[in-house]
Image: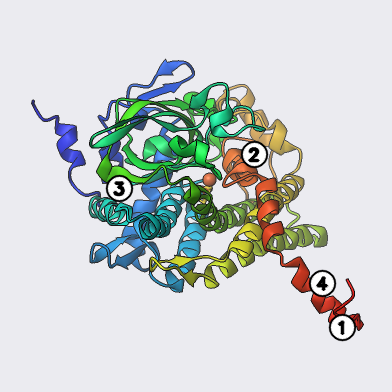
Amino acid sequence: MAVRPDAVARTAPITDGASYVESLRGRNLRVYFLGERVAEPADHPVIRPSINAVARTYDLAVEQPELATAWSSISNRRVNRFLHVTENTEDVVAQNRMQRRLGQLTGTCFQRCVGMDAINALFTVTHEIDRAHSTAYHGRFREFVRRAQEMNHTLGGAMTDPKGDRSRGPSEQSDPDLFVRVVERRAGGVVIRGAKMHQTGCLNSHWILVMPGMRLRSEDRDYAIAAAIPVDDPGLTFIYGRQSCDTRALEGGEVDQGNAQFAGQEAMILIDDVFVPDELIFMNGEHEFAAGLVERFTAYHRRSYVCKTGLGDVLIGAAALAADYNGVAAAPHVKDKLIEMAHLNETIYGAGIASSHEARRTEAGNYQPDDLLANVCKHNVTRFPYEMARLAQDLAGGLVATLPSEKDFEGPETGPMLKKYLKGRDGVRVEDRARVLRLIENMTMGRNAVGYLTESLHGAGSPQAQRVQIARQMKLEEKKSLARALAGIPKSEK
Ligand code: SF4
Ligand code: FE
């Protein structure tokens, strides 16, 4: 068989953002957007900004290796931090610092934390399954990670199943495919079927790590499957999600896009009877480990949401610029609103970075962040960006929602009038005023509002999921005994 030139390019390790983009070309993925098959996602104007956001993670590793790479004892080389299995507490903390920086640079979801958090969760859980069942998952998994590090691949993590009737478990659904499951066991591997929802950055990845998304019982054994699938497996179909204002990228021009360069990506993955060979299977039937895997992953991923403080930094800056362009930068209420935004933003970061600082060594040898603080971080993320968006729109003024389009600014009739009447403070270009208002629109109600608001609400688990974890870990009895001791209530009393 003749080797395609693009396939050869993909066998070379990725070195930077540009070679990452090249590695995505020619994969012949089955991607659908607005009902049509996308010939080449890397060239699609709506999809490309999400690829640019991932490419930025590769470039940051070149520009600031101390921030975005780490020495890995798995492959004995420096690797991209998104592919690194943590080896000490500092590694866990450094992830958060890198996430905040990338949030500042892209103003959106840069997608790679899912894979980073998935490899750290699978690293410990495969170790634990092996100890209980004398299986060989951990060694396989290390080998998978080593190869990914060597090639500098992007990994996606796929946990959320369609779930059908939420009151029923996976094996009780009228359609058994509503959770990803093994449909056939063969010598040398298994065949899996199902779908995964809301998959951040999935078609910008090279591998998808499929994992169960909830606690499983013995009758759900076929659903206890964790495995790696190459994104270009012909059994995968990707249906691209819509994001508010995404088609502005099809109109030409760039001002109205607000952030023309970067965006997030969410797609649904259909898994139509994909064969997975043994060496890519990391859990197969050990249902009692599914809940632990979900908890490990979510503790990692929930404190990864400090990414949104990087976006918050951009939004605070945009709100301050908008006020400045309007000539009200010195007004006390404007300053106060900016202080309020900064307070909310740092409160999110405070909980996330604290969770990382409290990371503890697991028996497998990597480090696991503090679960309670991770959940508090993510719970703050479900609320504070909405308040910050409100404050940013308040500071921007109503023009954020009524500004005429870039085409109107260019029109021979309308342009001069718009430039006359939409002038702000002296010395400020009208176009700059429009650009900053479009950025605030982009982040609070446009394309990247998905990344800043809705993903903050539902990504890594909706608010109720964090409340369940907080309830489990808030040690209420211990707190009651503290209160009893100080109030002088004898231990024998309730
Ligand atoms: Fe990373 Fe944040 Fe995107 Fe999750 S939402 S993948 S933590 S950037
Ligand atoms: Fe997410």
Where does residue 137 sit, x and y in percent of width and height?
A: 32, 52
Q: Amino acid at mark 2?
A: Glu
Q: Quadrant of the C terminus?
A: bottom right
Q: Is residue 493 left or right of residue 39?
A: right
Mark 1: which secondary structure?
helix
Image location (x, y in percent) of residue 270: 43, 26
Q: Earlier in the sequence, mark 3 or mark 1?
A: 3
Query: Which quarter of the figure is the N terminus placed in?
Result: top left
Q: Earlier in the sequence, mark 2 or mark 3?
A: 3
Few, some or many residues within 10 Å of mark 1 (<14, 14–19, 20+): few
Q: CA distance from mark 2 to mark 4?
A: 47 Å
Measured Cα–Cα span from mark 2 to mark 3: 33 Å
**Residue 421 appears anywhere in the view:** no
Res 90 → quadrant: bottom left
Please, is residue 125 above or below residue 450 in the view? below
Q: Mark 3 highlights which residue?
A: 153
Return the residue nearer the eye: 364 or 406. 364
Specify the label residue 441 is tagged with. 2
Q: Nearer the viewer, mark 3 or mark 1?
A: 1
Q: Would you name the residue on which mark 4 appears?
A: 480
Precedes in sequence: disc 1 or disc 2: 2
Of 409 and 36, the residue lying toward us: 36
Q: Name the residue at 66% across, 41% down.
A: 444
Q: Which residue is mark 1?
A: 486
Q: Amino acid at mark 3?
A: His
As measured in the structure, the alpha-carbon distance from the residue carrying label 4 to the one carrying label 3 is: 49 Å
On the question of residue 69 being in view, the answer is yes
| Amino acid type of the residue that numbered disc 4 sits on in the rendered structure | Lys
Badges 3 and 1: C-beta atoms under 8 Å apart? Answer: no
x, y percent for residue 248: 53, 27
Distance between the Cα atoms at labels 3 and 1? 56 Å
Judged from the image, the secondary structure of the residue bearing numbered disc 2 is helix
